[in-house]
Image: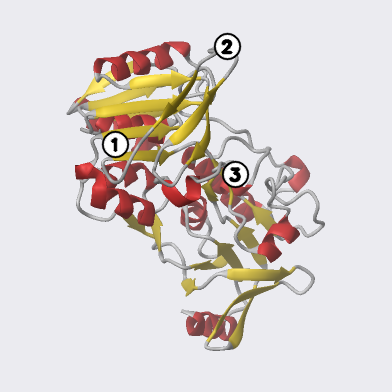
Amino acid sequence: MYNQFLYLMETKKQKQTICIVGNGWASYYLAKNLDKNKFDIVVIAPNSHVLNTPKLVDYALNIIDNVPYIPNNYMDVHIDNTVMDVDFDINKLYLKPCNGEVQTTEYDIVVFAIGSVVNTFNTPGVKEHAYFLKTIEDAIALRKIVKNVTNINIVGSGPVGIEFALKSSIPIITLYEGKLDILPNIQSDLFRGKILKELSLNNISTRLGTIIKEVDDRGNYSLSETPLMDLHKKLYCYGDAHIVLWCSGVKPNDTEKQLVEKLQIKPGTKVDNFFTPTHLTYKNVHCIGDMVINQGPPTAQNAKNQAKWLANYLNNSNKIDRNFFSQYQPHSRGTIIHCKDGIFIDTKLYKGRIIRPFSDIVVKFIEWLD
C-alpha cells in the first residue's frame, strides 16, 4: 500500500530503496535475488501477484481451474498503481492520481520491468476480432468459449501457439506462420522436425510463409502468401465456433506515453552492459525483461536470467569495480513444449519427447536448477 511506502521512507535510511516498476517474471526474480539486508524492495504494479504465463494455455483450455498466479512474497511494499512519469534528476516517480491527488515515490535505484504486449503489426481488424493469450483477461475470454469452438486458426507458431494446438481438443486446427519454419527462434532443426511430426499426427495443418493481412468483422481474414509459396486464399470464420487466435509475437509495453519517450521504449529500450539505458547518464536507472531489445530474446527465461544477473550486480556493486564485473551473456537452458501427454524438450543433452510421469520429474528438476 502507498501508506506503507510513506512509513518506510520515514523510518529507513540504513538501506537503499529500490523501486521495481512492473510485476512479471523479471520483477519477481529480481526481488527474489536482491539482498534484503541492503535494499528495501518496493514493487509498483496494478497487481501484487505474478502471472504464471506457461500455465495460461492450460487455464484457457479448462485443463486447470485455479487462476495461474504466483504470489510475489519477496517485496517489502507493494504499491497498487501505475507509474505515469519519472524525473531522473530528483529520483522521483509519478503515479496515476488517486482520488484527485498526485502520488509520488522516491527511489535510490529504479528498475523498469514493464514487460510486453501483443504485437498485432497494425494488421486491420486483429484488435477488434481476434483472441489473444498474453494476459489473464485473454485466457478468461478464451476459456468462456473454447468448448464451443470447432475450428480455430492460430496465427504464430511460437511455443504458445504450438502448445495451444497440441493440448487442444478442437476438431479443426490450422497453424499459420509468417516465416518458413515453425518455432523460428529455435535453432535445432531436429527438434523442429519432431514438433512438426507431432502436429501432423494430431491432424493439425501448418501453413508456413503465410502473412495475415486482415481480420474482418465477420471473423474471416484474408491471407497473402510469400512468393515462395505463390498461393492466395481467403478463409472464413464466424462467431464463437470459428475463431482466430493471435500468437504472433510481442512488443515492448508502450501504454504510458511519458515513459515511452523517456525510456525510448519504441521500438525497444537499448541498454549497456549494466542494463542502464544507453541514452541516459543516470547509473541508478535500469531496464530488464521484454522491454529491452539488445540483451537476448523476449522470453520468460531470458527475463529471469537478466534479473538474476542484475540482482547479483546490485548486491555486489559496492564490493566490485563495475569495470571488472562480468558482463551479462544471454543464454538458454533449452526449450520445453508441453503436449497432452508429456513434453518435448530441446537441450544439449536430449532432444525429443518425454511422456508422463517422467516429464513431470524433468520439469521439476529444471525448476530446481533455477
Q: Given the image, on which type of amino acid does mark 2 rest?
A: Leu
Which residue is under mark 1? Answer: 364
- Of pointers 2 and 3, the one earlier in the residue sequence: 3
Q: Secondary structure at mark 3?
A: loop
The structure residue drawn at horizontal position 47% and vertical position 12%, both measured from the top left corner, is 189
- Of pointers 3 and 1, the one earlier in the residue sequence: 3
- Residues at circles 2 and 3 in contact by the CB criterion of under 8 Å: no
Q: Is residue 194 above or below residue 319?
A: above
Q: Which label sits on residue 62?
A: none
Quadrant the C terminus occupies = top left
The structure residue drawn at horizontal position 70% and vertical position 47%, both measured from the top left corner, is 274
Residues 194 and 307: in front is: 194
- Find residue 28 and report its horizontal and vertical position in percent: 46, 55
Q: Secondary structure at mark 2?
A: loop
Local crowd size for mark 3, using a 10 Å CA cut-off: few (<14), some (14–19), many (≥20): few
Local crowd size for mark 2, using a 10 Å CA cut-off: few (<14), some (14–19), many (≥20): few
Local crowd size for mark 1, using a 10 Å CA cut-off: few (<14), some (14–19), many (≥20): few
Which residue is under mark 2? Answer: 228
Q: Given the image, on which type of amino acid does mark 1 rest?
A: Lys
Q: Is residue 370 visible?
A: no
| Relative to 245, 9 lies left or right | right
The structure residue drawn at horizontal position 58% and vertical position 19%, both measured from the top left corner, is 226
Q: Given the image, on which type of amino acid does mark 3 rest?
A: Asn
Q: Is residue 284 visible?
A: yes
Which residue is under mark 3? Answer: 122
| Relative to 31, 285 lies left or right | right
Q: Secondary structure at mark 1?
A: helix
